Image: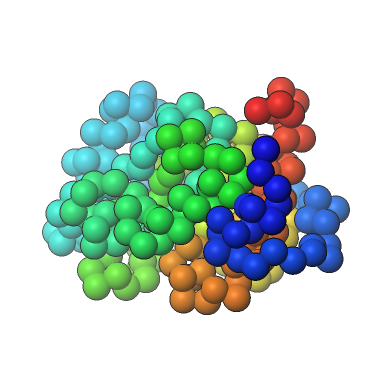
Amino acid sequence: MRSRAQYLREMGLTPWTLITDARVIARQQTDLVSSELESPGEVALSDWTSLQQQVGNCMRCSLHETRKTTVFGEGDPKADWLLVGEAPGAEEDRQGLPFVGRAGQLLNRMLFSVDLSRDEVFVANVLKCRPPDNRDPFGEEVNACESFLHRQVESIQPKIILAMGRFAAQALLRTDQAIGQLRGRVHRYPAYDIPLVVTYHPAYLLRSPQAKAKAWEDLILALAEFKSVPGSENI
Ligand code: URA
C-alpha cells in the first residue's frame, strides 16, 4: 500500500496536509428524474456491440464529416469506475481510443494515484467525434451525442462516475452550473442513482497545475464514496 505522499508525488504534486477531509463535504442529491433523460434523439436500448456499431455509423451531427474515426470509449464494459471526458482530440481521432495524448498520460497518473489502472475502469467522452481544431463542442453536438453516453452508463452500471470537466459534468447532470459549483460534493446520476463526482479535465490540469491539489481532493472524495458502496469496501 503506497502512502498518500507517494500518491501525491505520482500525480506530480508536492505532498501537503489536507485541511478539509473531502469525505465530510456535504452530499447533495440532484433533483433530476429519469424522465429528463428521455430526449428525441434517444438511442434504442441495445446491447453493447450494437451500441458500438451505432456510434461507429453515426451521422447525427456534422462532426461525422470531419472525423477520421469515432471514439466509443475504452476499458472494462462492466467497470466499477466510469470516467467521462469531453471529446476526442487529434490523436484520439487518429487512433479511435480516448485519452491517448498528454491529457491521457496525466489521467493514467491520476488513476495510478488511487491504485487504479486504465483497464480496470471505462473511459468515455461526451462527444464520440472530434470537434475540428479542438474547439469546444457546440450545444447541438452535445444534444446529438449525449444519449450514447447515457446508454453507456446504463449498460456499464458503474459504482462511481467521475465527470472530468465542464462538458462531462453538465451533460451527465443536465445542468448549466459552473464546474466550481459542481465540484466538492457527491451528486447522483439520475435514473440509476449512481454517485457522481465532478473534477477538472486533465487537459485543464496540464495548463493549470495549481488546480491539481483540488483534483486530488476530488479523487479522494470519489474513492471514499466508492468505498462506501456496500460490497466495495475491500476492492
Ligand atoms: N480530451 C478528452 O476530453 N477526451 C479525450 O479522449 C482526449 C482528450
Name the side, left or right, on which 31 lies relative to 10. right
Whether 187 is drawn above or below 154: the answer is below
In the displayed structure, 228 sits above or below 130; it is above
Please state which of residues 17 and 158 is positioned toward the viewer in this rendering.
Answer: 17
The quarter in which the N terminus is drawn is: top right
Image position of 77 (left or right of 10) = left
* Residue 189 is at least partly visible in this image: no
Rendering coords of residue 67 (x, y %): 18, 57
Ligand 1 found in image quarter? bottom left
Q: Is residue 38 above or below residue 131?
A: above
Q: How many marks?
A: 0
Quadrant of the snapshot with the C terminus:
top right
Asked whether 163 or 57 is in front, the reply is 163
Q: Position of residue 95 (x, y in %)?
A: 21, 49
Residue at image coords 48%, 27%:
78
* Of residues 123 and 152, the one drawn nearer to the viewer in this rendering: 123
Horizontal and vertical percent for residue 48? Answer: 35, 27
Taking the spot 27% from the left edge, 41% from the top edge, the residue there is 55
Is residue 34 rendered to the left or right of residue 127? right
- Residue appearing at x 73%, y 42% in the figure: 225
Residue toward you, 55 or 12: 12
Residue 113 % position (x, y): 59, 49
* Residue at left offset 79%, top offset 63%: 18
Give the vertical position of 33 relative to 232 (above or below). Answer: below
